[in-house]
């Protein structure tokens, strides 16, 4: 069986409140700060409440979506008086946790999010490298009573727009309505974070993790709501699709129910829907995303010894 | 009064259906928009005229609960008269204060003969409450009969009648402007989202309500009966940090989504972020609702608690026009006094 030795991981950043109304991350980060979680084994931990202004306002963002500010272009754009708060904040975070693409960047960045979609625990990655695949596999095995899935966004890292792209490896987790903290979701996310830290500790102390295969969903395209000439939506997600994230969608399956009661059907190749009825995506013109499912193999790994 | 003699009540000539009182409670927004679209050119729906109102357009445009202040707390007599009883509101006044006066002029004035006969104000909640009527009275036979009718027509939908025991003087919500009024609150739905099952339930509820009004006005006798009513007793806030006032716990997983399931003293109530369970310390079992309503964090409400009772609702029948004129004359002479 294939085996890879990988460089050690020295630091991890755990971030919450990137969207100010996605509350699980806010409270997980605060709890870790209360417990003075600064080190696990030889790995140092940084916890960051990334968008405090949006958290205080109880809104996703104040001027622009912070989690779209981390492309190379935006991170290097000059700051002027009219620069939105979130863009300034992105550059601050890049200085603190990056710079993105450099050797100084944190080894692992975990950004905690919630969604109104019924997605269970989801890891969203740009790059499926051995570290992220192993952590995902580890958590999936340990949290076997709940759905744990991986989504890959196939975007080159320079165009990668979200916070976790700043770290050398990164991911988002979570499901929950905006502005609400649910205990079951908090417990699930806290457990996933604790397991990640446990994995890091074991990895750092020389443990070999066995390779294997894992399924992940790769984003193919997005579908918007039907809209009228004024741009207002004219239908809601059909009840057969609502809450059925990751259930295969086939041509002819209902996807929308118009406000006057008509059913609209999907036409296209068989794909897996996710982010079905995510509240924050109405303004981004996304009713749901569609993905292909792929299987990835990865070798066993252990930390490279000098 | 004989047990089987119906109570005579005036016809409901003007009915208002309001959506978007909270701009991010979207089922009502889209339902009223849809009704406005299909009603184009047809002002009257015999035998009552139905007004469709989008109450808070600015909050709707921002997809937020409110722009400056909660519109649905602006309808007390005191706030409507405000600091300047007859003059204009100052420019710096919250948008919603200005809007509440407009709505009061359109649908009221509150407490006067000119007020609409019935207001149904459409709301959503993140709490798992099913379909709820929320009213200030437990003896407004119109509202109770509409509720009873909906229960029968929509027997698969969990439905409850909630009574807030607040005097007319202190009543603060939009529905208090009408001679009769109630909020139709449906959940769970995240704010800023529309879920088709919730939208559909609201649409059916409103259609049945309007059918009932039509039947009532046409002279149907509606037989009385028993209706279960939940009367609000108190609210419980989240445990909070003494300095920052940040919440330190959330609704316990055993209580989450269990609106209207009896909460007993000693039952789990909250789970702290460090994993500790806090229990309900009250001394009587009560029925929880509005469990984990997103908009109530800022109001200091984790959940509300109610007692349940049975109300005997009499049969009712629309008052004949002659009798209505007689009672109007006595209303007018009361007003003159």
Image (cartoon, coloured by chain):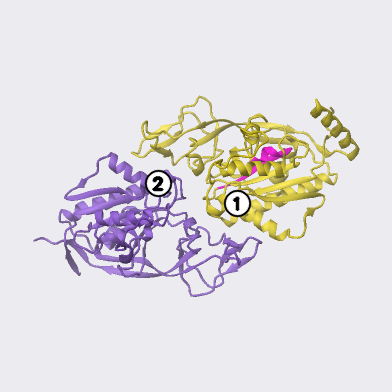
> For the N terminus of chain B, which image quadrant?
top right
Which residue corresponds to the image point at 59% horizontal and 57% vertical from the top-left?
A: B196
> For the C terminus of chain B, which image quadrant?
top right
* Front position in the image: B296 or A207: B296
Tell which subunit mark 2 falls on.
A
| Chain part drawn in magenta | B174-187
In the picture shown, does residue A121 fall above or below B113? Answer: below
Q: Secondary structure at mark 2?
A: helix
Image quarter for residue B331?
top right
Q: Which residue is mark 1?
A: B57
Numbered tag placed on residue A218 in the rendering: none
In the image, B221: left or right of A43?
right
Q: Was residue B180 drawn as part of the magenta stretch in this picture?
A: yes
Q: Was residue A128 drawn as part of the magenta stretch in this picture?
A: no
Which residue corresponds to the image point at 43% horizontal and 52% vertical from the top-left?
A: A60
Q: Which residue is mark 2?
A: A55
Q: What is the C-alpha distance between the residues marked 1 and 2?
A: 25 Å
């Amino acid at each position: 069986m294939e085996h890879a030795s990988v460089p050690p991981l020295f630091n991890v950043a755990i971030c919450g409140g990137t969207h100010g109304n996605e509350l699980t991350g806010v409270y997980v980060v605060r709890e870790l700060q209360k417990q003075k979680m600064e080190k696990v084994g030889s790995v140092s931990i940084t916890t960051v409440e990334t968008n405090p202004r949006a958290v205080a306002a109880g809104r996703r963002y104040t001027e622009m979506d912070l989690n779209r500010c981390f492309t190379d272009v935006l991170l290097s754009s000059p700051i002027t008086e009219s620069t939105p708060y979130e863009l300034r904040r992105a550059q601050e975070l890049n200085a603190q946790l990056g710079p993105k693409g450099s050797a100084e960047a944190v080894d692992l960045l975990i950004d905690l999010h919630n969604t109104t979609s019924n997605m269970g625990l989801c890891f969203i990655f740009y790059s499926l490298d051995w570290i992220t695949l192993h952590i995902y596999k580890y958590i999936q095995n340990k949290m076997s009573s709940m759905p744990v899935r991986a989504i890959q966004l196939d975007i080159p890292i320079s165009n990668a727009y979200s916070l976790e792209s700043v770290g050398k490896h990164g991911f988002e987790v979570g499901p929950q309505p905006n502005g609400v903290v649910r205990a079951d979701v908090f417990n699930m996310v806290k457990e996933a974070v604790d397991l990640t830290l446990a994995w890091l500790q074991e990895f750092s102390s020389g443990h070999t993790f066995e390779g294997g295969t894992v399924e992940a969903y790769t984003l193919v395209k997005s579908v918007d709501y039907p809209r009228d000439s004024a741009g207002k939506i004219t239908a809601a997600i059909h009840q057969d699709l609502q809450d059925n994230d990751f259930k295969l969608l086939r041509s002819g399956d209902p996807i929308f129910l118009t406000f006057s009661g008509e059913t609209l059907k999907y036409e296209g190749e068989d794909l897996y829907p996710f982010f079905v009825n995510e509240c924050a995506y109405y303004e981004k013109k996304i009713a749901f995303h569609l993905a292909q499912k792929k299987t990835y193999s990865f070798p066993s790994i252990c930390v490279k010894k000098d | 009064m004989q047990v089987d003699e119906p109570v005579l009540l005036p016809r409901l000539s003007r009915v208002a259906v309001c959506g978007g009182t909270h701009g991010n409670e979207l089922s009502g927004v889209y339902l009223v928009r849809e009704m406005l679209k299909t009603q184009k050119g047809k002002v009257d729906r015999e035998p009552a005229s139905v007004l469709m109102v989008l109450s808070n357009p600015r909050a709707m445009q921002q997809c937020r609960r409110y722009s400056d202040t909660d519109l649905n707390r602006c309808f007390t007599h005191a706030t409507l008269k405000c600091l300047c009883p007859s003059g204009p509101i100052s420019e710096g006044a919250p948008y919603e204060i200005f809007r509440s006066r407009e709505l009061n002029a359109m649908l009221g004035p509150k407490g006067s003969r000119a007020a609409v006969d019935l207001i149904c104000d459409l709301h959503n909640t993140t709490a798992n409450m099913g379909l709820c009527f929320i009213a200030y009275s437990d003896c407004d036979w119109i509202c109770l009969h509409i509720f009873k009718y909906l229960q029968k027509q929509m027997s698969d939908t969990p439905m409850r009648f909630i009574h807030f025991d607040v005097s007319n003087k202190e009543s603060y919500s939009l529905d208090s402007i009408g001679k009769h009024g109630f909020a139709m609150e449906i959940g769970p739905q995240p704010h800023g989202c529309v879920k088709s099952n919730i939208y559909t339930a609201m649409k059916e509820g409103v259609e049945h309500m309007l059918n009932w009004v039509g039947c009532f006005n046409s002279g149907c006798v509606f037989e009385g009966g028993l209706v279960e009513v939940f009367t609000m007793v108190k609210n419980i806030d989240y445990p909070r940090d003494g300095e920052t006032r940040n919440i330190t716990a959330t609704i316990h997983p055993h209580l989450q989504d269990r609106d209207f399931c009896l909460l007993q003293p000693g039952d789990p109530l909250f789970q702290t972020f460090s994993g500790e369970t806090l229990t309900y310390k009250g001394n009587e079992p009560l029925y929880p609702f509005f469990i984990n309503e997103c908009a109530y964090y800022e109001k200091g409400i984790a959940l509300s608690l109610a007692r349940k009772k049975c109300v005997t609702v009499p049969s009712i029948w629309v008052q004949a026009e002659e009798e209505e004129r007689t009672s109007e004359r006595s209303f007018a002479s009361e007003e003159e006094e």
